[in-house]
Amino acid sequence: MEPAFVLLHVVMSFINFSRANGTACTLRGETVYPQLSKDGDIIVGGIFPFHSRWEITDLSYLIMPPTMKCMSLDFSTFQFSQTLIFAIEEINNSSSLLPGVSLGYKIYDTCSSTAMGVRMAMALMNGNDNTVLGEPCTKPAQVQAIIGETYSSVSMAVAMSIGPFSIPLISHYSTCECLSDKRKYPSFLRTIPSDYYQSRALAEMVRHFGWTWVGAIRTDDDYGNSGMATFTKVAEQLGVCLEYSLPFFRTYSQEKILRIIDQLKMSTSRVIVAFLDIWDLEILLEVFFEHNITAYQWVGTEAWIFDPVLATMDKHNILQGAIGLAIPKTEVTGLKDFILDIKPLKTAGSAIFTKFWEALFQCKYAVQNDTEDSIICTGEEKLSKIENTFTDLSLMPAFSNVYKGVYAIAHTLHTILGCNETCPTKKQPDPLTFLENLKQLRFKTKDGEEVYFDKNGEPAARYDIINWQTSKQQLEFVAIGSYVSTFPAHDRLVVNMTSAVWAQNTKQLPTSVCSESCPPGTRKAVQKGRPVCCFDCIPCAEGEISNMTDSIKCEQCNQDSWSNPQRDKCVKKEIEYLSFAETMGIFLTVVSIIGAFMTMVMLLIFLRYKNTPIVKANNSELSFLLLFSLTLCFLCSLTFIGQPSEWSCMLRHTAFGITFVLCISCVLGKTIVVLMAFRATLPGSNVMKWFGPPQQRLSVLAFTFIQVLICVLWLIISPPFPFKNLKRYKEKIILECHLGSSIGFWAVLGYIGVLALLCFVLAFLARKLPDNFNEAKFITFSMLIFCAVWITFIPSYVSSPGKFTVAVEIFAILASSFGLLFCIFLPKCYIIIMKPEKNTKKPLMGKAQVK
């Protein structure tokens, strides 16, 4: 903000207070006159920057500041002024809008200065005439409304000054979001969208192109600072980071400018978002060329992206390929011809017209100090013979905003004055009434465009996406997309990527990221002390995946799935169980069948030779039952192979427990028979009558019934069931049979162990009986093997992983079964088949020589 504006604001506050309280007021300072004017029943004011710069003076405030000297005529302002004049002339010639009421205008030059802008606004309100001494300063403002200003900073100062008087200021080009604050700027309206929407649109556009690491340069005023603040906020929400955000103003010292250059040279981002006006950017372009700051992708605001003046200034193509937002293309019928017909300007303001003519045609009207090289203006120069920024009407959308502002004033007057075929009165309405009606206005232009103001006095936000392209050495503004804020989020931004041209005139979309994208299978990990756009790519852990680029976290696979080696998708876990199809399953199946077959062969041998002494001497009934139970033991091992099911889980454990108890019960019965038989040979012993065949069968039945009872209780209370073991291995599922009740399982095993131990003890006690008769030593060996196997089984069972748990259990069943089969029956079968001479009563009855 200019220092002069601070002082001026204090002075204006005093004037406003005096005026509001009806005190006398007089003209202070020099009289200022409009650059262009025309009388009418109701006057419309205009403030435009006819000059883009002013001569900087020393504002020491010790003496009255000298008159500001404006420099550098701006042709586009004349186009804005002609648009205002065109709209007023069109309204005055209309029979349907404000019939009988003529509109006039007064257009002042702000010289792009906030102080000058406030001064001209006050001139439009109060006039320039000295009042009669002591006359109350209560007369109405000289204008109904003011069109302008182009720059947001000037509009802010003007709107704050005229706001207390409810004089509307309708801007065609001031986009600062700060002007939406109705508490500070109650009478400000505009026909161009706020930077709030533009900043959001720029952030979404930058993210759309994949630029997550960008730099920014902003004008160091309310327009640039406010717009960049909104852009930064939205960009962060979209995952875009600013490497730097540098302020700049045209009055900056060389030292400050060099600091900006150093920052750009150290930066790694290749995209620059520029919230600048054309005059600031013009200065920077020259500095950038001097320091070789080129090959950057520029992203611009509507303040400069569609400006032909700046395009002419960019002689070194620094902005080539720039992309940004502009007001959508619109046409106002008849306006183009009116602007190019410059002669009527002379009647509106001869002084400014002379300067304009000289600058336009690069000539001088005859004066005494003309040099010989000066071209003399004749006044008959033809506009068709020159080509400059004035003849370039690419700013027609901005001209349309001026046109809509004037028509908004006219339609509001038409409503308030009660005009039909004619207007009953030509009196200027009360400012507050006019302002309230203006805010609620809604109408359509002659070209069908709807005009209205929202609660903040702004129109709906629509933008064209403009791309700077060079065709045949001629710069063109090419529309490659659009943005409409009222559309759903996914439909707001539309860009035709194939028609875009980027920095250095390439068709390849540039990249600007702090870190390369993390591929699927990894996640982003922010680097300590740096923005979130700077990150490392960390591979997902086992069992986790990320199936999209730049994932911020890895998702855990569900229990039945596991991550593939690339960690980009979940695959079904390998299901593991002891199958009949795998090598181990086949081997154990074959061994089980062989064991059962061998048992059945021995059973057939015993049946074939059941009347021989060796079969009779070894209790043939228990032997047949033992062989039958051993066959079941071999076959029950097959129930442990294959996919576990509800029935197989219950069957495998109960069948195993019952058949083994049956088997051990038979062995125990045989052992008792051996002992009883030996005791029966002693004089006076009749012990065999207490353990004859009925008692033997009853003992086997009783021992087996106890195991059956244990199994039934187990199945009733908490039976085994199929279970997916997900804890043993993370990458695969173990299908196994859960024991249900562990007490039931160990009760079954414990009961078998007790019987086996009892059998072993009895057999051990009978080991020294006469050799030819005694089979207790074979039972002892078999029980020794049986106990050794099952004692070894317990730690192996507990520690074996997955399907090997089942394999260990099968091995224990087969090993103990083979131990019983080979130790008890194989020697007898050997004698029966290979040594039949020993299978007689005499050898069996012979006694070993007593030592």
Image (tube, rainbow, N blue to C red):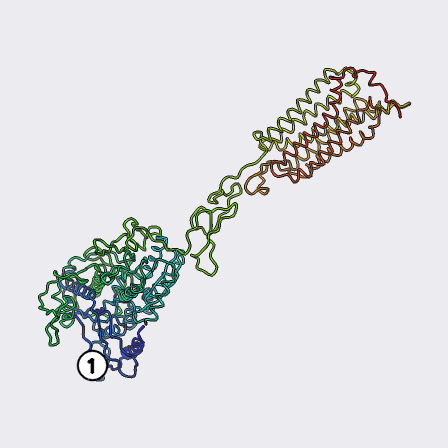
Residue type, label 1: Thr
Q: Is residue 495 left or right of residue 684?
A: left
Q: Judge whether 11 appears above or below 427 on screen.
A: below
Q: Judge whether 331 appears above or below 74 on screen.
A: above
**From this viewpoint, which residue is outermost toward the bottom?**
133
Q: Judge whether 496 appears above or below 77 on screen.
A: above
Front position in the image: 836 or 637: 836
Residue 145, visible in the rendered structure: no
Q: How far across and down, in percent of the image, does residue 845 sit?
A: 84, 18
Q: What quarter of the picture does the C terminus occupy?
A: top right
**From this viewpoint, which residue is outermost toward the right?**
684
Q: What quarter of the picture does the N terminus occupy?
A: bottom left
Q: Is residue 1 left or right of residue 570?
A: left
Q: Quadrant of residue 278?
A: bottom left
Count of number-bearing discs: 1
Q: Judge whether 5 appears above or below 723 on screen.
A: below
Q: How far across and down, in percent of the image, does residue 563 sit?
A: 50, 43
Q: Is residue 54 left or right of residue 597?
A: left
Q: Quadrant of residue 647?
A: top right
Residue 4, visible in the rendered structure: yes
Q: Which residue is mark 1?
A: 131
Q: How far across and down, in percent of the image, does residue 831 sit?
A: 76, 19
Q: Residues within 10 Å of mark 1 (few under 14, many from 20)?
A: some
Front position in the image: 264 or 745: 264
Q: Quadrant of residue 610?
A: top right
Q: Is residue 504 left or right of residue 787?
A: left
Mark 1, secondary structure of its residue: loop
